[in-house]
Image (cartoon, rainbow, N blue to C red):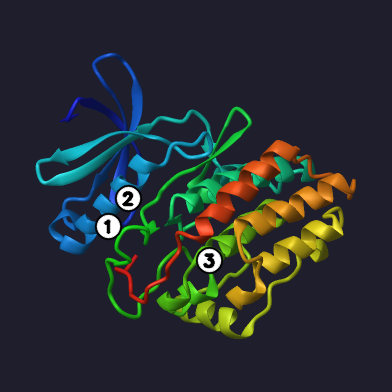
Amino acid sequence: MQVGPFQVVEEIARGGAGVVYRARDAQGRWVALKLLLEHRALNPLARARFRRETAALTRLRHPGVVSIVDAGEFEGQLWIALDFVEGETLEQRLRRGSLPIPEVLDLFQQLVQAMGYVHTCGLLHRDLKPDNVLLSGGRALLTDFGLVLDEGRDGTRVTTSGVFMGTPGYWAPEQAFGDTGAIGPATDVYGLGGVLYACLTGRAPMTGASLEDYVQAVRFGSIVPPRQARTDVPAWLDALCMRCLERDPAARPASVEEVARALASAGSSGAGGRARVGPWAVLVLALGVAASLGVWHLARGEDEPA
């Protein structure tokens, strides 16, 4: 099958809204080609969300974010071509067990840097989870911006009232309860905490046999600190993880910059499981994420069903 300038070779992933193929262009360059499924292509809201993802990716150029190559439409189906990343998802890696502490710290620092950049662009990811982190040659890259929220231009949202956005297990409580007015940078801080928790324990912060069970767990349950499941987790890292996973967004670190400062403070003090954060990285995050705070003007609205 030929889609735009790309020849499809094989299917590599499929979800409720789209399918991803490995494809290549006439010069032999490999890409990950994401198509909106045919039945979803008939839904104006699904098309609007796909176009929103395309627009967001066009603005993002960072070594910690998978880059867009091209985009277009094929027989009524919208498509995005992304750099093809050789490797595996963090979810696949975690199926083999939790990560060593130094590896956790290195990966988490990379994700904090990437999310700091995303926020400086006035965007929220809103679906941070191990399956949306690609690992390749020691690098961690963010992918799948299907739920991206851009309020930097006109403050509008493609919405439907009272729906769940994100992935069970890694939903921020405000997402689980459909409280779209409370969604902001702290929502992605929760997502970072969820990914950190999975790296340390091998599982999601919250679980449930059904949607009802999960929502009840979020409402009344408590997250078991990673240190209780794994004694080699440094106390400071356990505390940072649990702060990111606070139910109340106001109780979490206020920004990705604050998470970066916590990592830097632990690294400079020589805390157990030393966080090796260079001064340049802290400066870049501090300047970039601080600038992003001026971009966020949260408008109330609701989102299309995930």
Q: Is residue 166 left or right of residue 24?
A: right
Q: Is residue 202 visible?
A: no
The type of residue carrying mark 3 is: Thr
Whole-percent x, y for residue 216 in the image: 55, 83
Residue plotted at (23% across, 41% down): 79
Furthest residue to the left? Answer: 75
The residues bearing labels 3 and 2 have C-alpha atoms spaced at a distance of 18 Å
Residue that numbered label 3 is attached to: 187
Residue that numbered label 2 is attached to: 53
Q: Of the two numbered discs 3 and 2 on the same chain, state the one appearing first in sequence.
A: 2
Q: Nearer the viewer, residue 255 or 144?
A: 255
* Circle 3 Cα neighbour tier, 10 Å, few/some/many (<14 / 14–19 / ≥20): many
Quadrant (top left/top right/bottom left/bottom right) for the N terminus: top left
Secondary structure category for the residue under label 1: helix
Where is residue 282, by image quadrant? top right
- Are the residues tagged 3 and 2 within 8 Å (C-beta)? no
Quadrant (top left/top right/bottom left/bottom right) for the C terminus: bottom left
The type of residue carrying mark 2 is: Glu
The type of residue carrying mark 1 is: Arg
* Circle 2 Cα neighbour tier, 10 Å, few/some/many (<14 / 14–19 / ≥20): many
Secondary structure category for the residue under label 3: helix
Q: Of the two numbered discs 3 and 1 on the same chain, state the one appearing first in sequence.
A: 1
Q: Is residue 165 visible?
A: yes
Residue plotted at (42% across, 70% down): 298
Residue plotted at (28% across, 71% down): 159
- Are the residues tagged 1 and 2 within 8 Å (C-beta)? yes
Whole-percent x, y for residue 164 in the image: 40, 72
The residues bearing labels 1 and 2 have C-alpha atoms spaced at a distance of 6 Å
Whole-percent x, y for residue 109 in the image: 67, 44
Residue that numbered label 1 is attached to: 49
